Image (cartoon, rainbow, N blue to C red):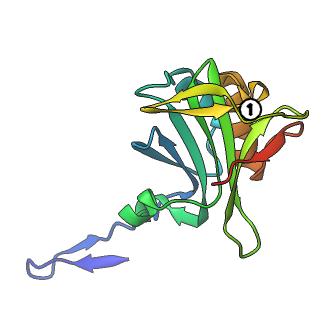
């Protein structure tokens, strides 16, 4: 392809721009920094930001599946800030995290779950997890480490689900 300049017909080759790679997920750190990931990303890097969670200033990591793949160069402010109905997130500090899953059903509203180990639960959740200015309360078997969370994030990135062996408890959100 050739383009014409304004200086009397001098011709220069046009530069075709690469449209940019596709991204399929948005990762948000403590409701501030957003990073977009595509299908070829190495998701093993989750452990580093998860180990940095302190429960106060750095207290959350959210991985949302975008409604449709987008070109990285075409992401708008609306894409960057839109609430996703399908995500996995963790809240707390690296040594005491709660894991949550949100997914949209067939035409229904998003359903929000807390992940835990299998087994019966009695009473209201009573173990506090530090989440910025407020605490979340969970059952003792719903507390995980950064290493556990990295496994969940990796599985969610690849399959849209969580690893086998977790129990989902609806949390009313």
67 relative position to 32: left or right = right
Instruction: Tell me where residue 30 appears, x and y as whole percent.
Output: 45, 38
Between 71 and 61, the one lying in front of the other is: 61
Q: Judge the density around disc 1: few (<14), some (14-19), many (≥20) Cα neighbours within 10 Å.
A: some
Residue at horizontal 68%, vertical 28%? 126
Screen quadrant of the N terminus: bottom left
Between 29 and 35, the one lying in front of the other is: 29
Q: How many marks?
A: 1
Does residue 17 appear in the picture of this structure? no
- Asked which quadrant contains residue 4, the reply is bottom left
56 relative position to 22: left or right = left
Q: In this view, which residue lies farthest toward the front?
A: 123
Q: In this view, which residue lies farthest toward the left?
A: 7
Callout 1 secondary element = helix
Q: Find disc 1 in the rendering and name its residue.
A: 151
Residue at horizontal 80%, vertical 45%? 168
Screen quadrant of the C terminus: bottom right
Q: Is residue 147 above or below residue 85?
A: above
Instruction: Tell me where residue 9 appears, x and y as whole percent.
Output: 15, 82
Q: Is residue 68 above or below residue 117?
A: below
Between 159 and 122, the one lying in front of the other is: 122
Residue at horizontal 68%, vertical 32%? 138
Q: Is residue 108 above or below residue 170?
A: below
Does residue 67 appear in the picture of this structure? yes
Instruction: Tell me where residue 7 appears, x and y as whole percent.
Output: 8, 77
- Asked which quadrant contains residue 51, the reply is top right
Between 59 and 74, the one lying in front of the other is: 59
172 relative position to 136: left or right = right
Residue at horizontal 63%, vertical 37%? 42
């Amino acid at each position: 392809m050739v383009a014409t300049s304004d200086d009397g017909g001098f011709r220069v080759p046009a530069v075709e721009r690469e449209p940019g790679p596709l991204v399929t997920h948005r990762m948000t750190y403590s409701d501030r920094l957003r990073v977009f990931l595509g299908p070829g990303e190495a998701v093993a890097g989750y452990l580093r930001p998860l180990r940095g969670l302190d429960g106060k200033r750095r207290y959350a990591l959210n991985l949302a599946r975008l409604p449709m793949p987008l070109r990285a160069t075409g992401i708008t402010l609306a894409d960057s800030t839109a609430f996703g109905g399908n995500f996995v997130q963790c809240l707390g500090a690296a040594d005491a995290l709660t894991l949550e899953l949100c997914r949209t059903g067939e035409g229904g509203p998003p359903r929000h779950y807390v992940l835990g180990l299998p087994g019966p639960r009695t009473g209201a959740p009573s173990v506090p997890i530090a989440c910025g200015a407020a605490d979340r309360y969970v059952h003792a078997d719903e507390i995980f480490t950064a290493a556990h969370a990295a496994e969940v994030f990796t599985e969610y990135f690849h399959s849209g689900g969580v690893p086998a062996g977790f129990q989902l408890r609806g949390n009313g959100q």
